[in-house]
Image (cartoon, rainbow, N blue to C red):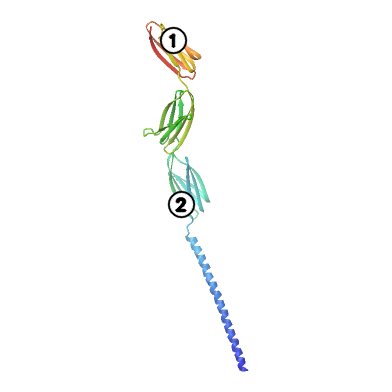
């Protein structure tokens, strides 16, 4: 009996001992798991802190685009901008960023070479600099003039003319290139044919700046004068396609003027003096063009 009781007590002690050991093992296991995850979390947090401390923010982008005599400046930054300083050929302009992420400016170029420097400072004190060179010169100027017989083309440029092209109406183009002697002014004269004609001109400089001009001309001719001797007389024959306005003639010292002729043809007979006669004729048409002629006759 006592042996049985002792055996039961021994079994109870053994069970309690084994049960306590199992619990301790479980507790240790979960403690190790918790410690392991704790180490991982602490490592991740530390890595994130170090990364934030050592990583460099993206550099701001500076976009500069030339449009004729202007430059468009566009700045973008992921970090708020504290200040922007730009200069053209050394003349600085400062802009407060006011923590903006985008800033745009329109800059006027000077004639010739333009050195543009842009410096950006963000709120963390990081500085980004960009420097470029741009060229600008004005487009060539074209002046078209004429007197009814000739059309004159005058092209001027501040820097260097490359070439001009001209053509009448829908005819083939003619190209005239500048030479080493002709750099900033180029001139040429053209005959104007009868009737209404349109002259087209294109001028291009060495920087590919282009100008275009168009002018309509009315091609006219000067009056015609023809003298014929018939014995002691001379016939003065004048004509004009647009119309006669004034006819003047002089034989030696005798001067005659016919105004408001208002005709396309005219004939005037004058007597010659004995000996040598100088006959001078001047005719003006309705467009204001003048023709003159002098001939000597013996009587």
Which quadrant is home to the N terminus? bottom right
Q: Nearer the viewer, residue 33 or 132?
A: 33
- Percent from the top left, x then y, of residue 279? 41, 11
In the displayed structure, would residue 215 be above or below residue 92?
above
What residue is rendered at 55% in x and 78% in y? 25
Q: Which secondary structure lies at badge 2?
A: strand
For marks 1 and 2, give the one nearer the viewer: 1
Q: Which mark is residue 286?
A: none
In percent of width and height, residue 220 lies at 47, 21
Identified at 47% across, 33% down, the residue is: 212
Residue marked by disc 1: 235
Residue 235 found in image quarter: top left
Q: In this view of the protein, can residue 80 be seen by the observer?
A: no
**Image point (51%, 65%), residue name:** 44
Residue 128: give its label: 2
* Residue most extreme to the right: 1
Quadrant into which the C terminus falls: top left
């Amino acid at each position: 009996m006592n042996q049985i009781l002792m055996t039961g007590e021994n079994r109870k002690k053994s069970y309690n001992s084994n049960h306590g050991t199992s619990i301790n093992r479980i507790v240790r296991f979960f403690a190790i798991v918790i410690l392991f995850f704790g180490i991982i979390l602490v490592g991740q947090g530390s890595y994130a802190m170090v990364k934030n401390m050592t990583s460099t923010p993206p550099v701001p982008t500076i976009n500069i685009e030339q449009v004729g005599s202007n430059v468009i400046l566009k700045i973008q930054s992921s970090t708020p901008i504290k200040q922007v300083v730009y200069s053209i050929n050394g003349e600085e302009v400062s802009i407060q960023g006011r923590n903006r992420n985008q800033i745009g400016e329109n800059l006027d170029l000077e004639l010739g070479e333009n050195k543009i420097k842009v410096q950006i400072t963000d709120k963390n004190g990081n500085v980004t600099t960009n420097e470029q060179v741009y060229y600008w010169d004005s487009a060539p100027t074209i002046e078209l003039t004429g007197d009814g017989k000739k059309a004159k083309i005058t092209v001027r440029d501040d820097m260097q003319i490359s070439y001009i092209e001209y053509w009448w109406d829908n005819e083939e183009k003619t190209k005239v290139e500048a030479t080493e002697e002709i750099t900033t002014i180029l001139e040429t004269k053209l005959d104007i044919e009868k009737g209404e004609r349109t002259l087209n001109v294109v001028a291009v400089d060495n920087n590919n700046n282009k100008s275009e001009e168009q002018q309509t001309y009315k091609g006219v001719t000067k009056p015609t004068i023809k003298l014929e001797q018939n014995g002691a007389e001379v016939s003065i024959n004048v004509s004009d396609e647009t119309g006669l306005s004034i006819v003047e003639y002089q034989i030696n010292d005798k001067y005659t003027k016919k105004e408001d002729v208002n005709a396309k043809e005219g004939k005037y007979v004058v007597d010659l003096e004995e000996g040598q006669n100088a006959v001078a004729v001047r005719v003006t048409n309705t467009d204001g063009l003048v023709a003159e002629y002098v001939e000597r006759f013996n009587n």
